[in-house]
Every structure is written in C-alpha cells, then in structure tokens.
Image (cartoon, rainbow, N blue to C red):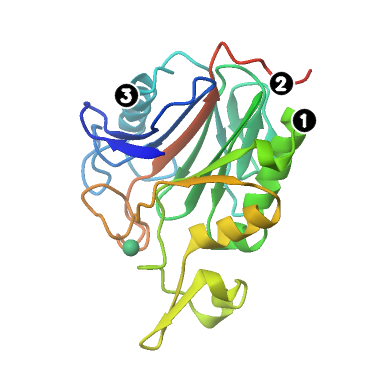
Amino acid sequence: MWTLDTDRPVPLWRPEPPDAAVILAFSTRRGGVSEPPFDTLNLGRSSLDRPERVAENRQRFLAATGLAAAPLATAGQVHGRRVSRVRTAGHHDDCDALVTTERRMVLAVSTADCMSLLYAAPGAVAAAHSGWRGTADGMPAAALEAVCEAAGVPARDVTVHLGPCIRGCCYEVGPEVAARFPAEALRAAAGRITLDLPTAARLQLLSSGVTHIHDTGACTACEPAWYFSHRRDHGSCGRHWAIAALTPGEISGRV
Ligand SMILES: [Zn+2]
C-alpha cells in the first residue's frame, strides 16, 4: 500500500495505488537545503535550523505533493491526546492531532522517532503525532473518534496509515514505560525491553473497530541515510512531516 518513491527530487512515501479522494504522504530527510545535523529536508520549526531553510524545505515538500498553494494547518504537539477540528489554516496550539472536512486543507504533523498516523475517511482526514506518552494515553483511538465524528462514519470506513517511526528493533524503554503497554507491543531480549509503537497503535485501532491499517514499516533509527532519529542523533536532528488533505473533488463531509 505504501511505496518509497525515490525517483524524484524530493523522495517521499506515497500510497500505491493512490486514493483519488485524498492526498497522503510521509517525508524522508532527503531533497532539502538544510545543513548538518538537519540535512537536508528538515521540516520542523522547533529545531535550531535556520527558519528560511525550513520554509524552503516545506515549500519543496508541498510542491512535490501538488499542494504548494494549499492552506496549511500544523499542531502544537505537546505529547497529549487532544484533537483539534480545523477549519482555517495556521498553527493550532495545545493539540497533537488535527482533523478537517475542508477540501485542500493540508494537515501536517512533524516527527523524528515519534509515530505519525494519517486517517482517511469519506469526507474527512486527520493527522496525529503519537509518541509513547500519546500512544499510552490513547491518541491513536482519540484521533479515530474525531475523524469518525467529523465524517459521520463508523470506524470500519476509516483507513489508518502509519508512518516511519522508531520501532521494536531499536526503541529501548525502561520498566515504567513498558508497564503502560500491552505485552504484544513489547519485546524482551538480553535484559532489554523494546517498544513497538505501531503494534501498540494497531491494537488500539483494531479494538476500536478499524479494519484497514497500512504501515510503511520504516524504522527511523535503523536508517540514518533516510530518516532523522531523535534518539539516535541525541536530539540534534531535523523533523519529518506526515501530511493529509482531501482533494478538491472530494465531498466536504457534513456541514
Ligand atoms: Zn530500528
């Protein structure tokens, strides 16, 4: 369902086959103008990178998805589980997920190890940022509930997509974090415990009635050539984007 399209100036993950009703994409670290340690496609304003470079990178990525001129909404990302219903462009503080029924409105969340989730329903899309805290607090299910409410559809009509993030191969956690997750999302070997965020999300979504989940399968910590990793790079790195938009032809949900 997802393919990493490397045959373009700005490589990106795109759905294959594409869904005509929505535009969904995950970025990599390639195709931008930022210098180390933000090289090269850093899309996060919270980093110490130069703002004009981040702006250029954002423009390049949006142009690569055909959304350069579309209104953009971003989230404050405070490791909570609050979802904002977005009707206008801009930065939406105090939330970790965005949902909209507006056509062409681009929802973007930024990550560098944390999980990004995109939701596509008839007439609504959502984008969520979910690290261990957000996932333990139920963000994957909270964003699902918001998109179901916005679109007026049941969970079985929503498709959820999981982006590149740190996974069970790399994400060592302490016992206090592990205690917040079901055993199926944890791996124990050689005295270490690791957490697989996508498995934790999948369990939540399945128990909420979702039947369509697609995962890029990419681990940010495993592949330094392709991804930033907050943990691997000791906090000094850029940010990826996950974006979702309803295409102009899609019916714009309920009024
Ligand atoms: Zn890994």
Residue situated furthest bottom in the rendering? 191
| Image spot of residue 108 (x, y percent) | 51, 34
Is label 2 in contact with label 3 (beta carbons under 8 Å)? no
Circle 1 — which element? loop
Pointer 3 residue: 60
Q: Residue at x 65, y 33 (%)?
A: 99
Q: Earlier in the sequence, mark 2 or mark 3?
A: 3
Query: Which mark identifies residue 253?
Result: 2
Give the numbered dot on residue 16. none
Q: Is residue 151 above or below residue 191?
A: above
Left or right of residue 78, residue 239 in this image? left
Q: Quadrant of ligand 1?
A: bottom left
**Residue placed most toward the observer, 17 or 187:** 17
Q: Quadrant of the C terminus?
A: top right
Name the secondary structure under disc 2. loop
Q: Give the mark nearer the N terminus: 2 vs 1.
A: 1
Rounded to the nearest angstrom, the CA distance separating label 2 from label 3 is 29 Å
Three-letter residue code for mark 1: Gly
Are discs 2 and 1 less than 8 Å apart at CB? yes
Q: Quadrant of residue 31?
A: top left
Residue 94 falls in image quadrant: top right
